[in-house]
């Protein structure tokens, strides 16, 4: 069956902002789909609100709509574009749900759009718990006892049947949001109520507990001719009870006999056929009882999922690409396997290595969140590692996590054997309750003398995994019994490296440094070799250069020429005799006349470093490849486009540590190595790599140091005559208080060298300083903490620029919506600035250029500025809007021309988080240009002469994971907590802002009730905003203080009691759905304060909660704009036509 | 922890040094690789591996131990076993013993800790080679010399060493709830004579499940002996090595064609081909694994199949009475054929699976229907 010719234009829906449970894996799948469909000649219309994605790059699709992903907006796109078909299965749960909404609202029918890949009834059958369960039972498959309920009363009846503990899963939620395990009636009631609220259809599944059972996943593909293959099996290290996104997972399955595996395979084939997924990939989860083998079906995702991305990277089989091709009519056997080229895609990959994925959590940013791992996903990213054995891949994955660890313990951060060694009681606790640290505690338990069987009984982690960890601990003890590096035998070194021990760990054990270990082992021939990921365990020659490192002892080769034997290498020169390393190591020399450029990626997603950097790495790879270089990508994040094997010429799936990168350099000899695009990860390696002789290109390591070293930076600022907020450093509390007194409170306190504002806080007085300094010092790890004057009510501005060392081009000037003090990654921002005077913008640009040249930047640089109205000028404006909040209605000229002061807050001589947003707002491919500058091109040669200031407005808004961490206070501060971002584009700022809010799921009501409660600081400035809302007809309610202020200004407001004053209070109103918007600016922080509870309740009840005046004012404008007329959609290609 | 050293020497002069497990001593065989990620117990006990030293491409072998149910014959049949890492402590509720203990008990030599992927790359490039596995003589040159002078697999009758001495009845179906496949018996029981050249037990279990009373006879049985059982159909089994030297079997089969329905698997397929005038040839390194895509030319659907063969029937050589029914999508080789006039058909792959997917069990039902 060849491809369909009756459809020409296909609509793809992306997954929107990065949130917990839905990350860049859907950029990977969507990008693959775009490429696959266009390759076949179809026109692709893409809708995705996330500007940081590679798929929203304007040349990935024919029509790229960066618009909110709601059925209403997508309907507008459909009406405008009239696509023939909608492919709903590649945009995660968001894409699938939106497609279903479009179907339910009759949009697809109205415009004659066919759903391809999976029809609506199929999606419904797979996603609706009861229908799915019925289907399984009908086929004779086993499922946990369960019941779907819509009320607490029904829930209690089901509970009586399935017993406690039991699992609670709300229907149709992301990453299992709102799900959990209830061990007692109280927990049960709480979870059911919350689940009913969170489920968009008000439905919750209550299920027999299978906690502790073994958990497996199969990735299945099916074509229209009913050919079905299993792409990959995955076994979860953490047994049932922990969401698979929060589990350490291993591919392939390790502990199933062939008979048990085939039984699961039979079930998977039967399920995909029964549910009726016509084409594409599905993920099916199973659990088996460890003692009886009883197998039950847990669930199915009738779409490409996080696990599909993992399976693709684990096997080399491009699931999303193939799924897209199957959707347009191809059969599996009509498609070629890209890797072998000769064999068809209709087969089941077999692998000859072990893949381990470890999630990365950020509980440190949400100290009030419950760190127990449950059926609701909490991790924000993941790393994957490939090794020849589980032991090797586990240790590689642990160092790939980039949490300062270099394997399973015995590194600098290892508390074992130090005063911080955990006591037995803590160990037992951490084993029994699943948590992010459990893997470390398994080792402690072994070191403390616990047997594998004891650990199994507490964790139910399969003994096979535990015995492998036992092997590592035993080897660690033998290694530490060896007195020194010099005393280590060649055999012992091989054994250690084959088990995945890093040079750092060995250096720690033998009291030396990693470079010494590296030198010593290389001297003895103990070197990494690189093997191919080839889908076929070497049965066929592979053409796709996708590599991982391992250690294999070379074979001996005797000269056999006497026997007249000739070996056919299949390589360019078949006559040349095979040397051992060529078979053990599968890397190839560069093509003649080609130079190699290596790009270091960003590693696992975390808050502060995510898809934006992957975007930059991919753009660099695309540009350099087009410019004739052989590109080499190094990354460890399986969700990304950068780890797609056709993004660059060579992919090395490796942890981003100096050792692993240098090993690759040894083999591939790159001409240049780029550290600018992967965020802080590669930048942190720059010094070590350069010291070891790696050819870093772009801005020099020394310039990076100037920007990062406080003293050198100050010298530069002074030299250029620029301003910095007053600042100091401290190594202890006394020093901190001294510095703060010198500078004058409020001050911003933060540790050195951290990303995303970790342990950063605005401190208003000495009392708070006393309680906070300890935490900051701890995070700073011996380096001094930094104390800056906090510029109150300043406007923050971000600038991205491009410099070739001679000339600087400003990529974009972004004005933040929220005032300085909110982390730049959490703040909304707008291009072009919507309320800064032209001369201030010019001054900012001038300063940026001066710094770029001074730092001899070659590539990208980001600067954060704070613009403050000088005190004198501001005090003259009594009653007027605060400048930082002034936007449309009060232009500066109407005021007494305030004087502005521009301060430099921070300079990062690398690609920043905002690069993709700027690129999409201005249509200038900054990252591509930067990569070409790094290989020696000048801006002139690239034809870049003018700076682009777009006529339309682009607003970036941040998206937060608060709904995953119930009870956590949501106010914004200097510590970054957002996971993703969305973009709104429109002719006018208010509409762009409105779109960004809708896209961020912070829906602004067109009418209704607004609760307003602000701190005393803000009582004056809230008045014009409240007046604006009241004038539009919104009903305002407030508690006493704010109500009094509003009434005094003649604004209509109803007073309601504070939480403890009586009922019905605000929480009651919210629960009853009688509040449509909350505006609450914080006076004190904390989940336990009244205002903290109000904000947390808003999250729970899905009421948009605005916590800064600046955002409230923008919201008022947006509401007015939305009420005035319908919002239209427009693709990037038209904005820049 | 310290294990005895073992060496694997190949006829091209390569010597791998690893650690011994299972039995010690010295053995030789054709070195081949199997790409199944599960099913090492079935591989070990498959008599078709007689004369071969088998490398598993999956690096962890032994994870789930050895159990009483997943055997394909009485004992392990391989000449030697090569793995990247042998699991010492198995983990599975059905496990009775460890891989290591099982091989030791059955005097099979194993070697672990060598670069099995490099070995597979070598076999892919160079083709299957004779190798010597030793713990007793660790001199590289001497081992390579032995590898180069040991008998080659081509032209040897290996089947005789694994076929039963005399006929016996088989009535057992699937013995474990974990190993069932979708197979249905017909209305009436059928009598089948199975020519055994080293038959996998799961073929017999499948025949039993479709309602056959099976009499297993040695592959050397004459047509007269076979017909004396008055069967409703004949089955020709898999088995090790080169089909060409098995002229006695080819002769027997020639006499059976046209008498009753015939179903052949693997070596049985090759023997049927030779009996009817086709030719066979040796593949460079064979097909051994559980992920080989086979197109069924009749239905147009693709089956993921289990395979274990180093020789194949040449499609071009098929006599005009025979038509190809199945083809390997990886390399286009013949995977199945049928007689145009008689209910006689065969496949090169293993529809009984074990180890491997159950996509092709329908062939047993077709055999049953051909007898009804």
Image: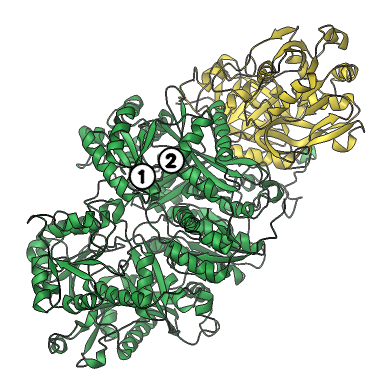
Chain colours: A green, B yellow
Q: Using the image, tell me which numbered label, if any, was put on residue A129.
A: 2
Please tell me whether residue A232 is drawn above or below residue A845 in the rendered image: above
Left or right: residue A225 versus residue A719 is: right
Chain containing the residue with disc 2: A
Please tell me whether residue A391 is drawn above or below residue A719 in the rendered image: above
Sequence order check, earlier mark of 1 and 2: 2
- Residue at position x 49%, y 46% from top? A124
Q: Using the image, tell me which numbered label, if any, was put on residue A387.
A: none
Q: Same chain for marks 1 and 2?
A: yes
Left or right: residue A1011 versus residue A858 is: left
Q: Residues within 10 Å of mark 1 (few under 14, many from 20)?
A: many
Q: Is residue A343 visible?
A: yes
- Residue at position x 30%, y 36% from top? A155
**Closer-to-camera residue (A385/A1093):** A1093
Left or right: residue A589 versus residue A953 is: right
> What residue did someone put label 1 on?
A203
- Residue A310 on image: x %, y %: 49, 48
SS under mark 2: helix
State the image quarter where residue B355 is shown. Answer: top right
State the image quarter where residue A18 is shown. Answer: bottom left
Please tell me whether residue B80 is drawn above or below residue A764 in the rendered image: above
Q: Is residue B137 visible?
A: no
- Residue B167 on image: x %, y %: 75, 7
In what quadrant of the picture does the C terminus of chain A appear?
bottom right
**Closer-to-camera residue (A203/A583):** A203
**Closer-to-camera residue (A456/A182):** A182
CB atoms of marks 1 and 2 within 8 Å: yes
Chain containing the residue with disc 1: A
């Amino acid at each position: 069956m060849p491809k369909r010719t009756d459809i020409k234009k296909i609509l793809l829906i992306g997954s929107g902002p990065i949130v917990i449970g839905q990350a860049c894996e859907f950029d990977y799948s969507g990008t693959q789909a775009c490429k696959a469909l266009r390759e076949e000649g179809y026109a692709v219309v893409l809708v995705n609100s996330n500007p940081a994605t590679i798929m929203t790059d304007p040349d990935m699709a024919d029509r790229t709509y960066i618009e909110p992903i709601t059925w209403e907006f997508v309907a507008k796109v459909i009406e405008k574009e009239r696509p023939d078909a909608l492919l709903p299965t590649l945009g995660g749960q968001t894409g699938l749900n939106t497609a279903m909404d479009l179907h339910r609202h009759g949009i697809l029918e109205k415009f004659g759009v066919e759903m391809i890949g999976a029809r609506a009834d199929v999606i419904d059958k797979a996603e609706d718990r009861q229908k799915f369960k019925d289907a399984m039972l009908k086929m004779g498959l086993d499922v946990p006892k369960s019941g779907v309920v819509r009320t607490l009363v029904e829930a209690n009846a089901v509970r009586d049947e399935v017993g406690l503990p039991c699992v609670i899963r709300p229907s149709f939620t992301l990453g299992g949001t709102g799900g959990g395990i209830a061990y007692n009636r109280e927990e049960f009631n709480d979870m059911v109520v919350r689940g009913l609220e969170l489920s968009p259809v008000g439905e919750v599944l209550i299920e027999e507990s299978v906690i502790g059972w073994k958990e497996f996943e199969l990735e299945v593909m099916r074509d229209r001719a009913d050919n079905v293959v299993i792409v990959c099996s995955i076994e979860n290290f953490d047994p049932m009870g922990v969401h698979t996104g929060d589990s350490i997972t291993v591919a392939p399955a390790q502990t199933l006999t062939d008979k048990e595996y085939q039984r699961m395979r039979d079930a998977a084939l039967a399920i995909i056929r029964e549910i009726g997924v016509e084409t594409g990939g599905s993920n099916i989860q199973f659990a088996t009882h460890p003692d009886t083998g009883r197998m039950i079906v847990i669930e199915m995702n009738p779409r490409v999922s996080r696990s599909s991305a993992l399976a693709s990277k684990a096997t080399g089989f491009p699931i999303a690409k193939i799924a897209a091709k199957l959707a347009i009519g191809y059969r599996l056997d009509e498609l070629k396997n890209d890797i072998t080229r000769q064999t068809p895609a209709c087969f089941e990959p077999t692998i000859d290595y072990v893949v381990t994925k470890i999630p990365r959590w950020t509980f440190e940013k949400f100290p009030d969140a419950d760190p127990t791992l449950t059926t609701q996903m909490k991790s924000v990213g993941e790393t994957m590692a490939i090794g020849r054995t589980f032991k090797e891949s586990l240790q590689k994955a642990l160092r790939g996590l980039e949490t300062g660890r270099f394997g399973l313990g015995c590194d600098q951060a290892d508390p074992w054997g130090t005063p911080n060694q955990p006591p037995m009681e803590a160990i037992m606790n951490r084993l029994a309750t699943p948590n992010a640290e459990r893997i470390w505690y398994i080792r402690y338990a072994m070191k403390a003398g616990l047997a594998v069987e004891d650990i199994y009984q507490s964790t139910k982690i399969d003994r096979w995994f535990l015995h492998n960890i036992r092997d590592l601990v035993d080897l660690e003890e033998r290694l530490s019994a060896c007195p020194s590096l010099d005393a280590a035998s060649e055999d012992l070194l091989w054994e250690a490296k084959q088990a995945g021990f890093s040079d750092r760990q060995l250096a720690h054990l033998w009291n030396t440094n990693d470079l010494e270990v590296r030198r010593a082992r290389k001297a003895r021939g103990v070197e990494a070799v690189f093997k191919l990921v080839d889908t076929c365990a070497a049965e066929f020659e592979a053409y796709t250069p996708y590599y991982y490192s391992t250690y294999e002892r070379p074979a001996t080769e005797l000269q056999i020429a006497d026997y007249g034997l000739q070996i056919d290498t299949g390589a360019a020169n078949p006559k040349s005799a095979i040397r051992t390393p060529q078979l053990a190591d599968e890397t190839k020399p560069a093509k003649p006349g080609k130079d190699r450029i290596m790009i270091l990626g960003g590693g696992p997603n975390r808050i502060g470093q995510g898809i934006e950097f992957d975007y930059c790495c991919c753009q660099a790879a695309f540009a350099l490849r087009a410019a004739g270089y052989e590109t080499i990508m190094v990354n460890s994040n399986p969700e990304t486009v950068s780890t797609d094997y056709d993004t660059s010429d060579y992919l090395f799936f490796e942890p981003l540590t100096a050792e692993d990168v240098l090993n690759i350099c040894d083999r591939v000899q790159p001409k240049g190595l780029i550290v600018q695009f992967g965020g802080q990860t590669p930048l942190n390696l720059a010094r070590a790599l350069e010291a070891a002789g790696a050819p870093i290109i772009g801005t020099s390591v020394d310039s990076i140091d100037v920007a990062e070293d406080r003293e050198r930076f100050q010298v530069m600022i002074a030299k250029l005559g620029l301003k910095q907020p007053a600042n100091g450093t401290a190594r202890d509390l006394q020093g901190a208080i001294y510095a703060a007194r010198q500078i004058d409170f409020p001050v911003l306190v933060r540790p050195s060298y951290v990303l995303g504002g970790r342990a950063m806080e605005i401190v208003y007085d000495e009392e708070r300083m006393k309680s906070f300094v300890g935490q900051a010092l701890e995070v700073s790890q011996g380096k001094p903490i930094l104390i800056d004057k906090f510029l109150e009510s300043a406007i923050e501005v971000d600038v991205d620029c491009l410099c070739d060392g001679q000339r600087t081009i400003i990529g974009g000037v972004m004005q933040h919506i929220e005032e300085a003090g909110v982390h730049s990654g959490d703040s909304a921002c707008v291009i072009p600035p919507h309320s800064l005077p032209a001369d201030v913008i010019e001054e900012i640009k001038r300063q940026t250029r001066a710094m770029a040249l001074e730092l001899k930047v070659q590539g990208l640089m980001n600067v954060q500025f704070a613009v403050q109205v000088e005190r004198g000028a501001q005090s003259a404006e009594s009653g007027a809007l605060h400048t930082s909040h002034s936007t449309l209605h009060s232009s500066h000229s109407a005021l007494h021309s305030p004087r502005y002061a521009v301060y430099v807050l921070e300079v990062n001589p690398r690609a920043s988080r905002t690069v993709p947003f700027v690129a999409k707002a201005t249509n200038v491919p900054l990252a591509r240009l930067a990569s070409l500058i790094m290989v020696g091109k000048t801006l002139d040669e690239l034809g870049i002469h003018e700076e682009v200031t777009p006529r339309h407005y682009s607003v970036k808004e941040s998206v937060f994971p608060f709904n995953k961490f119930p009870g956590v206070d949501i106010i914004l501060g200097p510590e970054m907590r957002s996971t993703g971002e969305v973009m709104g584009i429109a002719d006018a700022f208010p509409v762009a802002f409105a779109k960004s809010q809708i896209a961020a799921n912070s829906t602004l009501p067109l009418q209704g009730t607004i609760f307003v409660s602000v701190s005393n600081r803000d009582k004056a400035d809230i008045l014009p905003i409240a007046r604006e809302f009241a004038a539009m007809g919104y009903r305002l309610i407030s508690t006493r203080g704010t109500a009094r202020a509003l009434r005094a200004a003649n604004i209509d407001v109803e007073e309601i009691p504070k939480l403890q004053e009586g009922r019905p209070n605000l929480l009651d109103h919210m629960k009853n759905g009688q509040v449509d918007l909350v505006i609450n600016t914080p006076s004190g922080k904390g989940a336990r304060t009244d205002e903290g509870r109000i904000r947390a309740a808003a999250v729970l009840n899905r009421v948009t909660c605005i916590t800064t005046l600046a955002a409230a004012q923008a919201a008022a404008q947006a509401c007015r704009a939305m009420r005035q007329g319908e919002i239209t959609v427009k693709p990037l290609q038209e904005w820049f036509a | 922890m310290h294990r005895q050293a073992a060496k694997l020497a190949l006829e091209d002069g390569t010597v791998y040094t690893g650690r011994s497990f299972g039995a010690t001593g010295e053995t030789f065989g054709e070195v081949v690789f199997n790409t199944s990620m599960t099913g090492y117990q079935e591989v070990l006990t498959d008599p078709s591996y007689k004369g071969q030293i088998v490398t598993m491409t999956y690096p962890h072998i032994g994870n789930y131990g050895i159990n009483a149910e997943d055997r394909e014959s009485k004992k392990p049949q391989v000449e030697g076993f090569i793995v990247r890492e042998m699991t010492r402590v198995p983990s599975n509720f059905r496990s009775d013993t460890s891989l290591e203990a099982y091989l030791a008990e059955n005097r099979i030599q194993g070697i672990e800790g060598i670069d099995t992927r490099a070995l597979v790359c070598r076999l892919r490039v160079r083709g299957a080679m004779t190798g010597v596995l030793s713990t007793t003589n660790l001199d590289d040159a001497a081992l390579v010399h032995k590898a180069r002078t040991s008998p080659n697999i081509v032209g040897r009758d290996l089947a005789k060493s694994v076929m039963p001495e005399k006929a016996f009845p088989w009535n057992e179906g699937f013995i474990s709830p974990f190993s069932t496949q979708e197979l249905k018996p017909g209305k009436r029981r059928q009598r089948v004579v199975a020519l055994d050249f080293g038959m996998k037990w799961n073929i017999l279990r499948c025949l039993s499940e479709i309602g056959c009373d099976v009499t297993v006879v040695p592959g050397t049985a004459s047509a007269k002996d076979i017909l004396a059982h008055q069967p409703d159909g004949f089955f020709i089994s898999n088995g090790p090595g080169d089909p060409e030297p098995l002229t006695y079997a080819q002769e027997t089969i020639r006499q059976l064609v046209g008498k009753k329905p015939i179903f052949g698997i693997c070596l049985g397929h090759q023997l049927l081909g030779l009996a009817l005038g086709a030719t066979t040839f040796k593949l460079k390194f064979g097909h051994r694994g559980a992920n080989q895509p086979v197109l069924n030319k009749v239905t147009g659907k693709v089956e993921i199949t289990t395979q274990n063969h180093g020789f194949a029937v040449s499609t071009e050589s098929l006599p005009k009475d025979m038509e190809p029914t199945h083809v390997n999508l990886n390399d286009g080789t013949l995977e199945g054929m049928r007689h145009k006039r008689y209910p006689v058909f065969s496949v090169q792959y293993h529809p009984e699976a074990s180890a491997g997917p159950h996509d092709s069990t329908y062939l047993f039902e077709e055999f049953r229907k051909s007898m009804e």
